[in-house]
Amino acid sequence: MAVRTAGRTPPPPRHATPDARTVGVELVWDEAHATRVLGDLVLGARRSLFLSTANAKDVRVPAPVGTRDRARGRYVSLLGLLAERVRDGLELRFLHAGALSRPFRASLARWPALGRCLRSCPRVHLKMIAKDGERLYLGSANFTGAGLGERGDERRNFELGLVTSDDVLLDAAQARFDRIWRGAECGACKLRGECPDPIDLLVERAASPTKPSPTKATPTKASPANTPPTKAKATVRSSRRPTHA
């Protein structure tokens, strides 16, 4: 899809190439996010899932097909489904900005392995999902039920986005994501003082874990070093024969 702008042509972004290209994209809007983005990309990932959002909530989704909860029409935590995939080997990278909702934090306490998959940056505002290095979503939807189409017609957000398999767009988007994920943008950030936990420091701590402090041994009464040697009592045998009355 070739994009044209009215008036003066703006300069190309710093990380983009100026060459015009024609790529195949799919336009997704409103409730279609539930199937094309949430269902196909998020829940369809098997090897890797790179996800960034400005706002994050514990999205509730219909229970998987074939389960008892699905037969009863119940909804389950999307984070719980992702936790199962992480346990099975999915590489999940979840970038978000701002404080997490209380239900989201409760789900993290229930599935603590997900905590290692999250990093926070107050400047993150891009909404991006990259599935298995093969499919890419770029759009307006946050990681919330209203954004991803899991609300009623009168309650969900008005959202627009694009889904593509173009390898050049995938490489560029994932490279941008990776710079933020590994803290490459932290050093020159002017909002560093407002950041509760800069990512570069988080990466540094993960790369060099602290060694456990040595503990002093407490002497005990049974310690051989502190117990004086005891003399063995000699057993004296009498050489006299017993006398008979």
Image: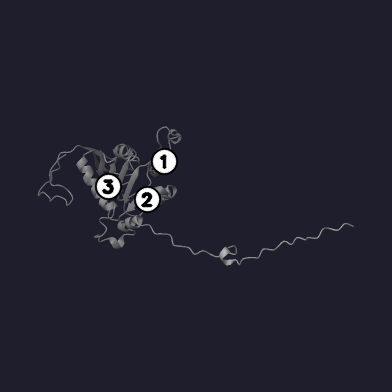
Which residue position is annotated with label 2?
116
Q: Nearer the viewer, mark 3 or mark 2?
A: 2
Q: Amino acid at mark 2?
A: Arg
Which residue position is annotated with label 1?
76
Residue nearer the viewer, 98 or 238: 238
Q: Position of residue 99 (x, y in %)?
A: 35, 54
First of labels 1, 3 by sequence position: 1
The vertical placement of 72 against 8, above or below, is above
| Pointer 2 local density, CA inside 10 Å: few below 14, some 14–19, many at least 20 | few
Q: Position of residue 222 (x, y in %)?
A: 59, 62
Q: Position of residue 193 (x, y in %)?
A: 30, 63
Which residue is outermost to the right?
245
| Pointer 3 local density, CA inside 10 Å: few below 14, some 14–19, many at least 20 | many
Q: Position of residue 15 (x, y in %)?
A: 18, 50
Which residue position is annotated with label 3?
127
Say whether residue 113 is left or right of residue 177.
right
Q: Amino acid at mark 3?
A: Lys
Rendered residue at 31%/43% (across/down): 49
Q: Amino acid at mark 1?
A: Val
Residue nearer the viewer, 183 or 121: 183
In space, the residues marked 1 and 3 are separated at their CA atoms by 23 Å
First of labels 2, 1 by sequence position: 1
